[in-house]
Amino acid sequence: MGEATGRVTVLGAGSWGTALAIHMARRGYDTKLWARSADHVEQMIADGCNRRYLPDASFPSRLKPTADLRAALADPELVICAIPSHGMRETIRQVAQLLGDGPAPTYLIAAKGIEVDTLANMHDVLHAELPPVHRDRVAVLGGPSFAAEVAAGLPTMVVVAAPDEGVRLAVQKMLSGAGVRAYVTDDVVGVELGGVLKNVIALAAGVGDGAGLGLNARAGLITRGLAEISRLAIKLGAHPATLAGLAGMGDLVLTCTGGLSRNRRVGIALGEGRALEDILKEMGMVAEGVKNTLSAHRLAEREGVDMPLVATMHAILYGGLAVTDAVDRLMGRALKAEREW
């Protein structure tokens, strides 16, 4: 594919936002990477990289960090929303105020989360907060994609979901190249929930690894985790094929087994007996699975869907359940047939 042209804005300078900004600049787009902290931006400009999150990934010449949201939103074709899910609504409100009813860019949601209080997914958040003329131009990004590998240009396959065919095809074209191959679907619910719920299962897989439960346990947990994700997602309107694809099985396997997975690392430390507060403080990064567990548990209760792994992680994180007791609880459940959907 030839060099692309145009303007892209990435909101959020964590590891994933930074990786996507590097990728889009490498593709040829003039890319602005927005961060809230002016100090962080100054450091990135001085270092030519995001030393805090991706120190080994140098910025291409087309990537420009900024702390000025108005300047960042100066006529982009694509706005990539990589803000952590708990801060997405407030940031999008600011975006809406600045853009008003002017020409609408395309929005690509790169965060994976469900609001704890409202149980809204990120697509719903943008649809609620953006001006009416912008709401039909929102897509969601999913699939197995570690930030460090995307930043390094390693082969990565992702999926873009949007109700509007023109929107998803446009984003697919903009993303594809320089190591990334994008597929498309209209299943926004499936892609969003696959990306959210796999974080919870990755925590559980990490707990098992940290506690020394073995590879048999990990494989079983991933498989049964996919069954849980599918039950809830299909109940909410997702297509089963989506959960067997990149945003479901693909992202789940990567996050449950890959050494770069923050959620797995948190789980491992929990399984080794460390306190959650100490783990997160030491990491200095967001592990979405911790908040995702709370929202996933509430969503499963609201929908009346049986999700024993999610319930167990909720009890470990928020109810003080010991890992050994959690294993006994899961293995001692009533026997049943393996049937789904």
Image (cartoon, grey):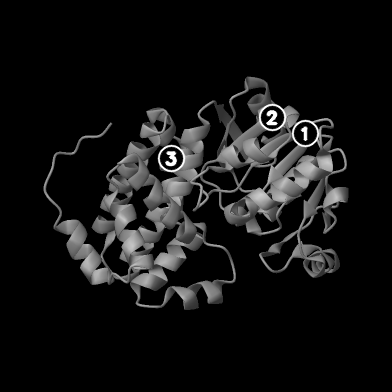
Secondary structure type for disc 1: loop
Cα–Cα span, label 1 and label 3: 28 Å
**Where residue 298 appears, x then y in whole percent?**
39, 50
Q: Residues within 10 Å of mark 2 (few under 14, many from 20)?
A: many
Name the amino acid, label 1: Pro
Q: What residue type is labelled 2?
A: Arg
Q: How crowded is mark 1: few (under 14 residues within 10 Å), some or many (20 or more)?
A: some
Quadrant of residue 326 within the rendered picture = bottom left
What's the CA distance linking mark 1 and mark 2?
7 Å
- Report the side of 230 relative to 144 (left or right): left
Q: Look at mark 1 in the image and give the residue it sits on.
A: 105
The residue nearer to you, when weighing 175 against 226, is: 226
Tell me the SS state at disc 2: helix
Q: Residue at x 38, y 71 (%)?
A: 270
Q: Is residue 47 left or right of residue 87?
A: right
Q: Residue at the spot x=15%, y=54% of the render?
A: 333
- Residue named by callout 2: 137
Residue 49, quarter of the rendered image = bottom right
- Quarter containing the N terminus: top right
Residue 190 in the image, given as x and y percentages of width and height:
46, 35
Q: Where is residue 138 in the image (x, y as percent from the top left)?
A: 66, 33
Residue 337's image quarter? top left
Mark 3 — residue? 248
User: Which residue is most to the top?
Assistant: 165
- Callout 1–callout 2 Cβ contact below 8 Å: yes
Task: Judge depth for marks 2 and 3 and give the one in front.
Answer: 2
